[in-house]
């Protein structure tokens, strides 16, 4: 099952019943986040997540903010897959940045979300100046009738799983380590659009997914899979600027192997990355580029021949 829900699903939610709530960026919805969400399930209450758009670090740091692991759509899909019933996405603006920790609790947690259980990480901070902490939450919880559960760090091989660590793995081309911390292969989602058909002319038709100026933590040529409502295919994937043809914007291109050029135009697809083959390069001419793509296809086949479980 490959859900590609419309964001017209309710992601701005006002509760009509007491809920088990967690708050955060949930960038990547990695295994640490998944453990946090598991405590919500155990409560027996309706489950809810409060997140923000843009992410607070993007609001404060602008273009200096590190690239996201997941877009809002990708985050919503992952939260739904982890059985979160209600998602509230607040616009992070100056008014929210100025909201005191006390008002955040009373106006948002208590009044809007009707929080009965709050599950947050051990280092959770909130409110203007990051003044709010677990001690404040526990005090207000006693006054307003909600329980606070502190989630300890989630460790793998003695290391704390974090979005920052996953981003570092991805930027270093360590896709298997990133997948271990995410609990799934790293993937990018988007809508397939018409390109310039250069791939078709070279003998390698591609599904083209614009990244819409979105900074991403990966760049290069990869072996992976394309998942769509029509089916799933092993693919050789390029993420970059296409320097050989003077490209100026980042684009994702996926050449599906062993497929009769599936018609994916207009469809939402997910592209999973399993192994980095090489960095993006600028070639002297299209013949040299074609030879490199030929080699990428061979190396993609070889990777999945050696890792058949990943092609399923």
Image: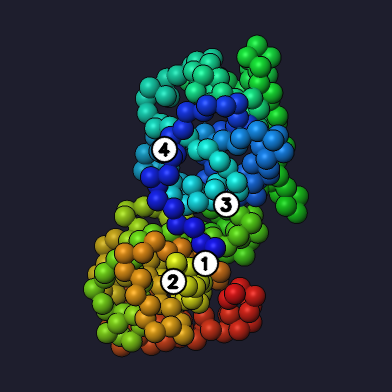
The mark nearer the N terminus, 2 or 4, is 4
In terms of sequence position, does the residue under pointer 4 or pointer 3 come before the other? 4
Q: Which residue is mark 1?
A: 273
What is the spatial separation of the Cα atoms under label 4 and label 1, in whole angstroms? 25 Å
Q: Residue furthest front?
A: 16
Q: Where residue 158 appears, x then y in whole percent?
A: 76, 50
Q: Secondary structure at mark 3?
A: helix
Outermost residue toward the top in this view: 143
Residue placed most toward the observer, 231 or 75: 231
Of the pair 107 and 96, the residue shown nearer to us: 107
The quadrant holding residue 125 is top right
Is residue 84 in view?
Answer: yes
Does dot 4 land on a helix, a strand or a loop?
A: strand
Reading the image, the residue beneath label 2 is: 230
Q: Is tag 4's residue or tag 1's residue first in the polypeptide sequence?
A: 4
Q: Residues within 10 Å of mark 1 (few under 14, many from 20)?
A: many
Task: Tell me which label, 3 or 1, sits earlier in the chain.
Answer: 3
Residue behind mark 4: 53
Q: CA distance from mark 4 to mark 3?
A: 20 Å
Pointer 3 residue: 81
Query: Considering the numbered disc 1 on the image, is that residue within a helix, a strand or a loop?
Result: strand
Give above or below for 44 relative to 101: below
Residue 49 drawn at (x, y percent): 55, 36
Task: Tell me if residue 209 comes above or below residue 95 in the rendering.
Answer: below
Is tag 2's residue or tag 3's residue first in the polypeptide sequence? 3
Q: Position of residue 55 (x, y in %)?
A: 44, 38
Percent coordinates x, y for residue 65 in the rendering: 43, 42
Query: Residue at coordinates 35% horizontally, 71% vertically from top-left?
Result: 264
Compared to residue 85, the image places residue 159 above or below, namely below
Question: What distance separates the C-alpha of mark 2 from that of mark 4?
Answer: 31 Å
Instruction: State the quadrant of the C terminus.
Output: bottom right
User: Which residue lies at the image location 45% right of the left edge and 67% below the top edge?
Assistant: 228
């Amino acid at each position: 099952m490959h859900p590609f829900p419309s964001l017209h699903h309710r992601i701005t939610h006002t509760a009509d019943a007491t809920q088990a709530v967690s708050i955060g960026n949930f960038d990547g919805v990695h295994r640490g986040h998944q453990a946090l969400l598991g405590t919500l399930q155990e409560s027996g209450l309706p489950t809810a997540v409060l997140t923000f758009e843009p992410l607070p670090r993007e609001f404060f740091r602008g273009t200096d903010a590190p690239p996201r692991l997941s877009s809002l759509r990708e985050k919503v899909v992952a939260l739904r897959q982890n059985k979160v019933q209600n998602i509230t996405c607040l616009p992070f603006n100056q008014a929210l940045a100025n909201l005191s920790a006390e008002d955040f609790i009373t106006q948002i947690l208590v009044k809007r979300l009707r929080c009965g259980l709050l599950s947050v990480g051990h280092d959770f901070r909130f409110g203007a100046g990051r003044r709010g902490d677990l001690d404040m939450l526990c005090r207000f919880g006693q006054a307003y009738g909600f329980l606070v559960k502190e989630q300890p760090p989630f460790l793998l091989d003695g290391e704390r799983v974090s979005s920052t660590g996953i981003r570092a793995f991805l930027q270093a081309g360590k896709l298997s380590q990133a997948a271990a911390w995410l609990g799934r292969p790293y993937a990018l989602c988007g809508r397939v659009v018409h390109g310039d058909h250069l791939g078709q002319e070279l003998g390698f038709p591609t599904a083209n997914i614009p990244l819409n100026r979105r900074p991403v933590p990966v760049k290069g040529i990869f072996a992976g899979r394309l998942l769509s409502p029509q089916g799933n295919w092993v693919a050789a994937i390029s993420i970059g600027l296409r320097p050989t043809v003077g490209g100026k914007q980042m684009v994702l291109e996926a050449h599906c192997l062993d497929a009769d050029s599936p018609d994916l135009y207009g469809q939402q697809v997910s592209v999973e990355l399993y192994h980095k083959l090489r960095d993006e390069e600028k070639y002297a001419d299209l013949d040299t580029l074609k030879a490199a793509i030929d080699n990428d296809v061979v190396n993609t086949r070889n990777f999945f021949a050696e890792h058949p479980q990943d092609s399923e």
